[in-house]
Amino acid sequence: MSSQHFYPIGTPGQAWGAAERAAWLARQRKQRSYADDVVSVLERLRGTFDVTGYGALDYGVEHYPLLAVRSRDWREDLPVLLVTGGVHGYETSGVHGALQFLQQHGGDYAGRANLLVVPCVSPWAYERIHRWNPEALDPNRNFRKHSPAGESAALVDLLEPLRDRVLMHIDLHETTDSDESEFRPALASRDGKPFEPGEVPDGFYLVDDTDQPQPEFQQFVIEAVAKVTHIADADARGEIIGAPLLMPGVIKFPVKEWSLCAGITNARYATTTEVYPDSPRATPQQCNDAQVAAVRAAIEYALDHRVD
């Protein structure tokens, strides 16, 4: 398939250079507003939480403040519960699920833990409903020190002082039909590789850490989400997105090796959610509700199984 044009930019078999990246960037269009959808919501939460900046991104004439939400009663003797969303800007329920969690349940853990929520890691991509940043980099392969992706570098720096204090980290994502129609073909073209079509799972699933698996934790979250929306089945090979199924609705990746968001800290309990918003069996609100259910279950399990 490497000799066939499966993406409108690039030459099959050749990795992109500056011209191809510029052509890709020229195709991107702003479709929604980070200021209206995210920043305005966080402004309304200032009466309840500490909303602080942890940097900013400047892309051309566009300026994006990066915002984090912290418990107002932050205490050094309490564990940290970390929620991240919008690492991939097109994964809408990751952003809106994090915001909904803050609005509905953010105050539930006062005195028990410190809550830290970053609802939209990639604001430029959120506005363009895209996976990459303007430099055609995937933030979720670049969460490491001195990262080439500004979104990733800023979050790594924010979390560096907390690496060993984070008890639980849940990173909110989606798997969409556009993964197969746009994003995986673009990735193959960018890297000069052949595109091998895959299968998009219908339903919710989780990604555990190969190097520090927590199967009971993952199962607890899956059972909570199953009350809100359906859990993805394995395909005919017994896999989800090419990874073997560990248990219903759970696969695993080497998250630190791949520089994924869920591996930034040394959290004992870490997971990545994957919601399927294109399912005929799920509404956008259900997708947000599934993310909220996952966050609440992850927190509940972590606090109940805390080891000091």
Image (tube, rainbow, N blue to C red):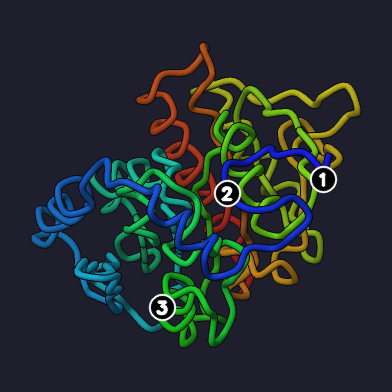
The crowd level at tag 2 (other Cα within 10 Å; few <14, some 14-19, many 20+) is some
Q: Where in the figure is residue 147, as x and y percent of width and height?
A: 54, 80
Counting the numbered discs, the total is 3
Q: Where in the figure is residue 57, as x and y percent of width and height?
A: 30, 73
Who comes first in sequence, dot 1 or dot 3?
1
Judging depth in this view, the residue of 47 and 259 nearest the camera is 259
Q: Amino acid at mark 3?
A: Ala
Who comes first in sequence, dot 1 or dot 2?
1
Q: CA distance from mark 3 to mark 2?
A: 30 Å
Disc 1, SS: loop
Residue that label 2 marks: 9
From the viewer's perspective, is 306 left or right of 110? right
Residue that label 1 marks: 2
Who comes first in sequence, dot 3 or dot 2?
2
Tell me, yes or no, if residue 267 can be seen here.
no
Residue that label 3 marks: 154
Q: Amino acid at mark 1?
A: Ser
The crowd level at tag 1 (other Cα within 10 Å; few <14, some 14-19, many 20+) is some
- Label 3 or label 2, whichever lies nearer to me, is 2
Task: Say if 307 sits above or below 188 in the image.
Answer: below
Locate residue 306: give its quadrant.
bottom right
Tell me, yes or no, if residue 45 can be seen here.
yes
Q: Amino acid at mark 2?
A: Ile
Q: Residue at x 47, y 32 (%)?
A: 290
Instruction: Find out whether the residues at labels 1 and 3 contact each other: C-beta distance under 8 Å.
Output: no
Disc 3, SS: helix
The crowd level at tag 3 (other Cα within 10 Å; few <14, some 14-19, many 20+) is many
Q: Where in the figure is residue 286, as x and y percent of width and height?
A: 41, 24
Q: CA distance from mark 1 to mark 3?
A: 36 Å
- Label 1 or label 3, whichever lies nearer to me, is 1
From the viewer's perspective, is 182 left or right of 99? right
Instruction: Find out whether the residues at labels 3 and 2 contact each other: C-beta distance under 8 Å.
Output: no
